């Protein structure tokens, strides 16, 4: 079948045998699948080579389709999703990205979106020029998170990456929140993600449904700091404290909300403070994320 006689206004692809292919003509003939995000796969499967103009055009079309789909899905509940944990040097970030179903949260494309959000938050945190004499901690809400640059290998903002993911996966999604912690020498950030899963393609990103960061101060380097930090993170995830409290506080029961006075999750016969004190570390702060947290309360209001 010959192509219609129309100007080849977009010489975006060509066959290995040097045939000139007009993308718009193929769309008119119904030879290219919809939606547009499938076009790249179609082109590759038919052994065509795209030049840089075609790549830019395809990206813009996918972006446009993603924004259109995002507008249609806006307002649909996003109770599922993932918590992402990323650590680099003295900086640790925790992010939450939500979707509609657990099925989509297990999709690699969704997990790559979480990775982009974590990397964007990490870049933001590392760009802050501050002289650390003690730890620093910050939070980003949905709007602030959406406006961050997507990263060195992606154009636009995290909001643009969100639209692309919505276009590809067909579910409403939200960039809910992020937290970051930077520590100087003498401090350590323990971390824990419940139900943790890692993928080789996602590098150092750890994913799960719950995540915790516990900031500790220590006067000396200890070989077991990572294990202590993980145990403290487990306690924060499981016991959901609201404040750190003091070692001088009276031991509390299961309803106790001060972290150091709570029964230690892994040995309820002692308090967390009694576990920490012999370890030579002091707990000074923590962050806890639970995926979908607050959604039920928002529905009932």
Image (cartoon, rainbow, N blue to C red):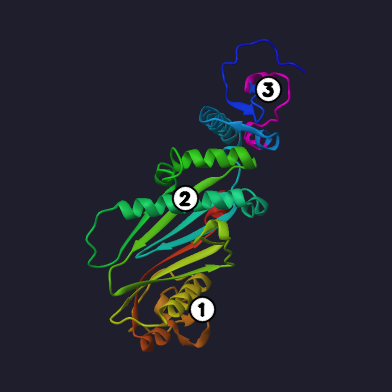
Q: Main secondary structure of the magenta part?
A: helix
Along the line of sight, the residue nearer the viewer: 238 or 282: 282
Which SS class for mark 2? helix
Is 33 a magenta residue? yes
Q: Which residue, as the protein is rendered here, is positioned at the far right?
A: 1
Residue 298 seen anywhere in this rendered image of the structure: no
Residue designated by label 2: 117
Whether residue 236 is situated above or below residue 22 in the rendered picture: below
The residue range painted magenta reads 22-41
In the image, what residue occupies the spot 45% across and 61% down? Answer: 86
In the image, what residue occupies the spot 64% across and 42% down? Answer: 169
For marks 1 and 2, give the one nearer the viewer.
Answer: 2
Which SS class for mark 1? loop
Residue designated by label 3: 27
- Label 3: how many Cα within 10 Å (few below 14, some 14–19, many 20+): few
Cα–Cα span, label 1 and label 3:
63 Å
Q: Which residue, as the protein is rendered here, is positioned at the far front?
A: 17
């Amino acid at each position: 079948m010959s192509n219609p006689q129309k100007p080849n206004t977009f010489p975006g692809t060509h066959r290995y045998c040097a045939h000139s292919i007009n993308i718009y003509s193929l769309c008119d003939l119904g030879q290219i699948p919809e939606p547009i995000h499938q076009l790249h796969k179609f082109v590759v499967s038919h052994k065509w080579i795209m030049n840089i103009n075609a790549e830019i055009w395809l990206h813009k079309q996918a972006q446009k389709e993603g924004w259109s789909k995002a507008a249609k899905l806006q307002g649909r509940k996003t109770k599922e999703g993932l918590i992402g944990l990323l650590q680099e040097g003295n900086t640790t970030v925790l992010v939450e990205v939500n979707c509609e179903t657990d099925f989509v949260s297990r999709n690699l494309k969704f997990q790559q979106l979480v990775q982009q959000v974590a990397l964007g938050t990490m870049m933001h945190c590392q760009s802050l020029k501050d002289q650390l004499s003690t730890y620093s901690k910050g939070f980003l809400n949905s709007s602030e998170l959406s406006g961050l640059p997507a990263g060195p290998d992606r154009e636009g903002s995290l909001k643009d990456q969100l639209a692309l993911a919505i276009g590809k996966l067909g579910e409403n999604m939200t960039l809910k929140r992020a937290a970051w912690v930077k520590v100087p020498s003498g401090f350590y950030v323990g971390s824990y993600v419940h139900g943790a899963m890692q993928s080789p393609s996602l590098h150092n990103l750890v994913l799960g449904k719950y995540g915790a960061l516990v900031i500790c101060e220590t006067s000396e380097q200890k070989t077991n700091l990572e294990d202590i930090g993980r145990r403290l993170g487990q306690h924060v995830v499981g016991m959901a404290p609201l404040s750190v409290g003091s070692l001088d506080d009276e031991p509390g029961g299961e309803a106790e909300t001060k972290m150091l006075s709570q029964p230690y999750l892994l040995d309820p016969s002692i308090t967390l403070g009694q576990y920490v004190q012999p370890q030579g570390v002091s707990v000074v702060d923590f962050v806890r994320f639970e995926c979908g947290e607050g959604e039920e309360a928002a529905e009932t209001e």
